[in-house]
Image: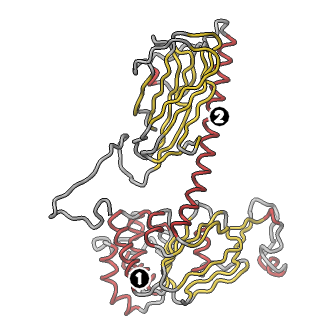
Amino acid sequence: MSTAIELREVRKLYRRYAHRRRFATLKSALISGSLASDLRPDETFTAVGGVSFRVPTGSAFGIIGRNGSGKSTLLKLIAGIIKPSSGEVKVAGRISALIELGAGFHPEISGRENVFINGVMLGLTKREITERFDEIVEFAELEAFIDAPVKTYSSGMYMRLGFAVAVHVDPDILIVDEVLAVGDEGFSLKCLDKFAEFKRRGKTILLVTHGLGTVQQFCDGAVWLDEGQIKGRGDPRRVVHMYLSDVAAAEEALLTAEDKKRVEATTSEKATEASADESGAGGEPPADMFRASEGRWGSGDATITDVTLDDDDGPTHLFQSGEQMTVRMRVTASEPLNDFVFGISIFNAEGICCYGTNTDIEELRSETMGGDGEVCLVIERLDLVEGTYKLDVAVHTREGRPYDYHRLLHTFRVKSDVKDVGIYRPRHTWTFTPNIRFRNPPGE
């Protein structure tokens, strides 16, 4: 199979401009031999470092990674907009690149004039542009605005016009950056249809996107770029899985650190209040606990010493909608107690209580508690929509006087491939009569 794009040990260095060292003139820089190669390592940063891969002709290839990972720099290297500091970039065929929103457009002139200017820049003759002009404008859905100055366009209009020109110059290789994210759903589907048409015609597509589902469904191969280095390559589903695992690990570490910081801060405040009050009351709780901001209150007769959230594999802050979650509280009582209630409430990011229960509501009557122990609430199906949630956990008397109340100190996130709305996701199915059909019926 022939190769449309090949990169061999490509590196791109940029200078850090915070350093005092300056060339007096461009001439002195050129005489010295290089603008960057003789700088110390701490005077440069590597946007792309030693990247090698090939894209077969007629394939769709995805590049994924976090913001700042070097994806856009890599596309500019392939498009020839910038040159590599070292290594080799080989491209077979004419390229049409849609890399930066509005790139190549002059804001003061009309969309019509910009179409002709961009078409010429991409290698078409004026006659060829005239022949394709109506088709470009229709595809961009800008018939009513094509003679207005481009500076009056929205970001979506910019993107539609740029994409329409890029795909209608009939390139051998189409390079598209994340600018498609500003389009509406209808236009995005139109773009995907155009990509499919390109593939059928043996054209090559290089796509940078945060739409991982698009990469898995549409691309034939993919690379995962992180800090200018390739961390994974090959089958798109495997590469996306590797990337998501890395993102989840970083997200887990962040949530763990934030929860620890909140608990330590409120523990310190509670200790200060207790030392100022010989009774050890630790401050009065808010009148309406559900309207209170994050904090911690209680007499300290019983204390929640640790809270963890577990899935089937152990402690985590990240859950898939519908899977099991165990809330595990480690508790201790300085003296034996016979009046105690354990409670847990789940709140969404807007502060709405999604669910709350306690042992008294569920008719578990306290008898005795002393020393160290553990309390677990097992939620067999976490049927919540995707989002960030916080927990209240507490041990208190039956009358509601808190021994230890943790308000919004513990965070977890629910992930889902389905982007529905609300709070609760009930288990459900759709059914239809035979005369109502969908392109992808549920269950296929």
Q: Quadrant of residue 258?
A: top right
Residue 273 screen position, x and y as percent? 65, 15
Instruction: Determine whether 290 is above or below 287 in the image.
Output: below
For image coordinates 42% across by 67% down, the residue present is: 151
Pick the residue in front: 16 or 8: 8
Secondary structure, mark 1, is: helix
Q: Find out whether the residues at labels 2 and 1 contact each other: C-beta distance under 8 Å.
A: no
Left or right of 241? Residue 379 is left
Q: Give the amino acid type for the residue marked by disc 1 in the picture.
A: Phe
Dot label at residue 432:
none
Count the marks: how many? Answer: 2
Give the Cα separation between the discs numbered 2 and 1: 52 Å
Pick the residue in front: 236 or 81: 236
Whichever of labels 2 and 1 marks the residue nearer the N terminus, that label is 1
Q: Mark 1 points at which residue?
A: 198
Does residue 328 appear in the picture of this structure?
yes
Instruction: Determine whether 172 is above or below 183 in the image.
Output: below
Pick the residue in front: 386 or 36: 386
Q: Name the residue under label 2.
A: 261
